[in-house]
Amino acid sequence: MDIILLLIPIFPLLGFLILGLGLRAIPRKLTAIIGPGMILLSFIFSIFIFLNFHYFAISPVRYFFSWISLPGLNIPFAFLVDPLSCLMLLIVTGVGFIIHFYSVGYMKEDPGFNRFFAYMNLFVFSMLLLVLGANYPIMFIGWEGVGLCSYLLIGFWFKNHDYNNAAKKAFIMNRIGDLGFLLGMFMLFTTFNSLGYAEIFAHAKWMASGNITLTTITLLLFVGAVGKSAQIPLYTWLPDAMAGPTPVSALIHAATMVTAGVYMIARSGILYVLSPVTMTIIGLTGLATALFAAVIAIFQNDIKKVLAYSTISQLGYMFLGLSVGAFTGAMFHLTTHAFFKALLFLGAGSVIHALGGEQDIRKMGGLMNKLPKTWFTFLIGTIAIAGIPPLSGFFSKDEILSAVFRSSEWLWVFAVAGSMMTAFYMFRLLFLTFFNRFRGTDEQHNHLHESPWVMTIPLMLLAMLAFFGGFINLPEIFGGNGGLENFLAPVFADANAVMAKQPPLSHATEWTLMGTTLLLVLAMAALAWYRFVRSGRDVVSEVNKQPALIRIAANKFYIDEAYETIIQKPLLRLSRFLHQVVEIRFIDRIVDGVGLLVIRTGNTVRYIQSGNVGFYMFIMIIGIILVLFFNILI
């Protein structure tokens, strides 16, 4: 059984090595089998581990070998098999395989076909290490691995300088967060003399709530989560990550990377519930991110940028859920979000494929009849993310909203406002893309076609998951038994025991909250329909006549420009000063002076080597006399 567990990350690593070393020598048809095939094998083995989960119940930590062994420090290479890691295994490998399968059609004509699948396999391997690790160092290896792979895949089309800048931006932003993660690990070791989850959590649960050391540790770890999961203020890299191929966007946003921060906090739940200050900061950060990104998404016209800001907003909801102790709710929404966000990104890729690379929704429209499969599956994804029953997003978002309401009614009001904006910008995207007349060029119109089966089958599979995924944790009010909540209960038992017990909501209150939220969401969908379908206004001309406030939101509140002015330009000026003044005029002159001194000294001293034997004997005698003289004096 341990061998099967170990093979789950080894398969994608093997795929990376085969494709990476073979690169151009391997035929494309073989690459199309190896790339997705390795992820499929990992998915099959993950299902096997899930079905035989009872085997690991007694001893969930599986040790393979001693990794780092020093006096006072012993870090084994070990995996943790518990309900949380099993859930993440199924998401990463299952959704990852669907995206790989879709990529065979999407990247068919790309000259970097083999390199693409090598990077994608490495990406999945890194994420599997992250979720399987039984200690923070192994998690950190996967954490850094997904950061490296995001850099490689965002800048995949490296001949475009802007794409390279986007890749560097993602890499640097993540390094800022990773520094916090690393410092948090150092503090964990100095506090608990261990970096293993079992040892740390066993000692932490007996510590006092509000302990300053735990607060500092959790804040540092949260900095890492902010960078990886694109929260304010380190979120700006994620929209620019759309520079990579669309399947990359789907993999980053749905199954890997951005979910890492949510997973890390959920995994460290006992540490966070003992740090109320950190929980408050997480909640405020998540809510602010959810609302801020939703406002920006309303005014974006790039189909992938809308979905990117949507991801940032939905991640904000997950962090909001974590902040009120709804760990299961956050993981539930992470799961459903993986389904419908992967569906939406791959649907967007199908549209872009049909339009020959066009991404501006102002130049789309009328695609419903031309791309019927893409349209129908995109509709399902839109309804799911908007939170309309009975699709998955309704159940997962409602669980978070219910937990937020129990904690603070004001937080619930703002969270519902975010849900309303989500519905508006997503239906705006749907209507501008698929309804009314086609606004592109005649050439694009003449070449409109549905994507091949290798791309539409993944859309259908994800649509089914987005439709039925919510039933894995059907609440009691709908006759369910909270299957996912019961499954994850052992993982969050200690954290839930520490959390202040909130009285459960009455069924009447739950129905009222759900009904209110649903009515407001439907109202926003209707408003989007009236604004972009019924009124028949010319979208293009109106975009060019935006009021000042809308222009500010459309330009993402100029946050990137502010960062450039406040941080980037001063650092560039400082670097130029250090280069031109300190290095060239000071350091270089010292180095050049030392070299010149050696050369001139050598040119002078070399005359001593005249080749005259008599001169050498004279110098030798003088030396002997001086030695004797100094010996007598001493």
Image (tube, rainbow, N blue to C red):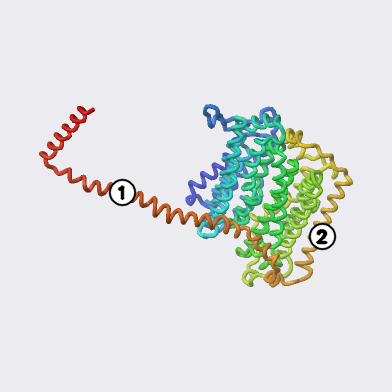
Residue at label 1?
Answer: 595
- Expressed as whole percent of the image width and height from the top left, the position of residue 532 reads 75, 67
Label 2 neighbourhood size at 10 Å, few (<14), some (14-19), many (20+)? some
Q: Element at badge 2? A: helix
- Expressed as whole percent of the image width and height from the top left, the position of residue 548 reads 69, 67
Q: Nearer the viewer, residue 86 or 227?
A: 227
In the figure, 194 relative to 548: above or below? above
Q: Element at badge 1? A: helix
For the residue marked with disc 1, what is the amino acid? Gly
Task: Identify the mark at residue 523; answer none if there is no mark.
Answer: 2
Image quarter in which the N terminus is found: top right
State left or right for residue 519 relative to residue 38.
Answer: right
- Expressed as whole percent of the image width and height from the top left, the position of residue 77 reads 57, 33
In the figure, 626 relative to 581: above or below? above
Task: Identify the mark at residue 120; answer none if there is no mark.
Answer: none
Q: Pointers 2 and 1 in contact (CB under 8 A)?
A: no
For the residue marked with disc 2, what is the amino acid? Ala
- Expressed as whole percent of the image width and height from the top left, the position of residue 294 reads 71, 56
Question: What residue is drawn where x is 75% and y is 37%?
Answer: 487
Q: Farthest residue in the right direction?
A: 508
Cα distance between the residues tagged 2 and 1: 77 Å
Label 1 neighbourhood size at 10 Å, few (<14), some (14-19), many (20+)? few
Q: Farthest residue in the left direction?
A: 614
